[in-house]
Image (spheres, rainbow, N blue to C red):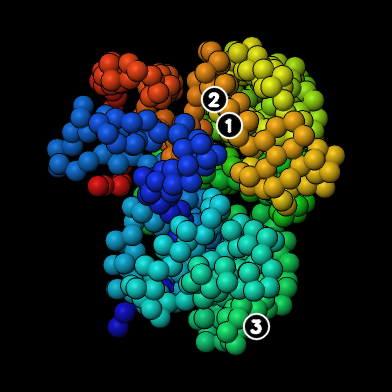
Amino acid sequence: MLDVLDCLVIGYNEGDFTTSIDTARSKGADSPEFRVLQKNYVELDGQQLTYLDLINRLLDEKSPRADGARHHYNVSEVPNLAAVYLAANMRSRGFRCEFVSLWNAERDAVVELLETKTVRCVAITTTFYLTPFPVIDIVRQIKLASPGTIIVVGGPLVMNLQDEAMGDDLDDSLRYIGADVYVAESQGERTLADLLSALRHNLPLDQVPNVYLDRAGAFRLTTRKPENNSLDAWAIDWSLVTDRPLGPTLQTRTARSCAFKCAFCNYPTRAGALTLASMDTVERELTQMAKLGVTDVVFVDDTFNVPPGRFKTLISMMIEKHFEFRWYSYFRCSNVRDESIFDLIKESGCAGVFLGVESGDDAVLKNMDKAARRDQYIWSIKNLNERGIITFASFIAGFPGETDGTIENTIDFINTAQPRFYRIEPWWYNHQSPIRARSADFRLEGGGYAWKHASMDIHQAGDAVDRVFSQVRGSTWMPMQNFDFWSLPYLMGKGMTSDTILDFCKISQRLLASENRESRRDQTSRYRRELLDLMEDVRMLPSKYRT
């Protein structure tokens, strides 16, 4: 008799990058989508490579594997937090549950599992998807491998579809994805547990709240029962997921939602009030991670150093416990007033922070409803840099109120503040974000990457990104596709030093910048040699993925 598994949780499907480029290029060489992607890859030997693809290619050439397999380092080797979170919590509630982090690399293992076990339910998380296509790919292949398995899709993608599509449009979208059940709840973990219980006991799924089901040829929502799950009651018990290697880098969270209400972001509205885990829960989870031998911990909280008093207690606890791992997080400069806090951050093991600066112009920051201003960001970055903490600053070009002058202020800001890494992208206009309520004030029209307002449009924002890229000195560009700030803890956990990563990004940036020059061939050859020389002494832990 085949084994019975209550649930298999699928983490992330990164898709095929070449297909993404071709799709973006089909919209035109001047399309915003293609211009954004252009700064996310380099060309080598006629191939378009993301930065991690480039690292794999260089290692294949410099340090070929003895077994003939190709190197396949991928940031998704870090266990997908949503998948781990759901799997651990379903196990703690008595369900048999497995998870996979990266669909692309683990697809064959999933098919084998479906052939050797009876899997009642496959749950697909959608934390990082802007479109349904990665989910459609998973759904179709699961249905081919196991037609009788119930497929559940939940997370931000479903919530966005619910917000943006109504009636027949929503029904068409859900039917196009092809799943059987859709969770319409911003948290959803309790709903998944209710679904698994109903499937285990052969109960009607209509009794489960917060789900869309196909009834009489149309998707209908069952009763609404908003979740407000305690982060203490639903914390990850890492001892429940140690039946598989987890690796040296793990992610966790100590809070849900965000205390701020930036005008370009609707996440706090959807996620609800800021909810915090108790210090006992945080300490217990970090202690479990330390016992697992983890070297790098990523806190994904949107407001990790908020409230300030709790943050100081948290890092003081980490110092007292003598944890030996490095840690990384988002960091809010508006909540730091005392320079001594930077010393505690360093002492507690902080290796890098993600700074959502967004603009170097105070007027634009005010339009964004950002709590910090230019001088405060400069002061914070200076203190972080002085303590050897890696700083990555993220920017938006084109938010309402943006002009050529404000872009010049952003360029001046980056060159003055000197974050170690930076990135700037054209603004994406989300109609669910608070700025829409002020659209008349800015003569704001359109949406997504098709917008314009009184002082700029999407194409001018693309030009502004190019200008920033060409005029920033001293701070190094970091792409977004398959290599971003969160690649740092992954690569450092594998054994690459921060200095090597920085040098790699500097050379890759020059390679990226040379792609439209007449001397590209000679420069590409030189930069390739520099990159190979850089990789000469790189020794990394093996990847669990193979090609």
Number of numbered labels in the structure image: 3
Give the spatial CA distance, label 2 vs label 1. Answer: 6 Å
Query: Where is residue 226 shown, x and y percent of the image?
Result: 73, 67
Give x and y (percent) for residue 430.
Answer: 68, 48
Identify the residue shown where x is 56% and y is 16%. 472
Mark 2 residue type? Asp
Q: Residues within 10 Å of mark 2 (few under 14, many from 20)?
A: some
Nearer to the camera, 190 or 522:
522
Vertical arrangement, residue 110 with respect to residue 23, above or below:
below
- Tag 3 residue: 207
Q: In which quadrant of the rendered view does residue 423 lie?
A: top right
Disc sitting over residue 497 in the figure: none
Residue type for callout 1: Gly
Q: Residue at x 38, y 78 (%)?
A: 147
- Identify the amino acid type marked 3: Gln
Q: Is residue 276 left or right of residue 124?
A: right
Q: Are marks 2 and 1 in contact (CB under 8 Å)?
A: yes
Report which residue position mark 1 lands on: 462
Q: Which mark is residue 466?
A: 2
Q: Give the spatial CA distance, label 3 vs label 1.
A: 49 Å
Q: Position of residue 245 (x, y in %)?
A: 36, 50
Classed neighbour count for the residue bearing mark 1: other residues with Cα under 10 Å, few (<14), some (14–19), many (≥20): many
- Whether residues under marks 3 and 1 lie with C-beta atoms below 8 angstroms apart, the answer is no
Residue at the image point whose x is 47% and y is 58% from the top: 133
Front label number (3 vs 2): 2
Nearest the viewer among 367 and 474 is: 367
- Mark toward the start of the polypeptide (3 vs 1): 3
The answer to whether residue 350 is left or right of residue 59 is right
Task: Name the secondary structure under disc 2.
Answer: helix
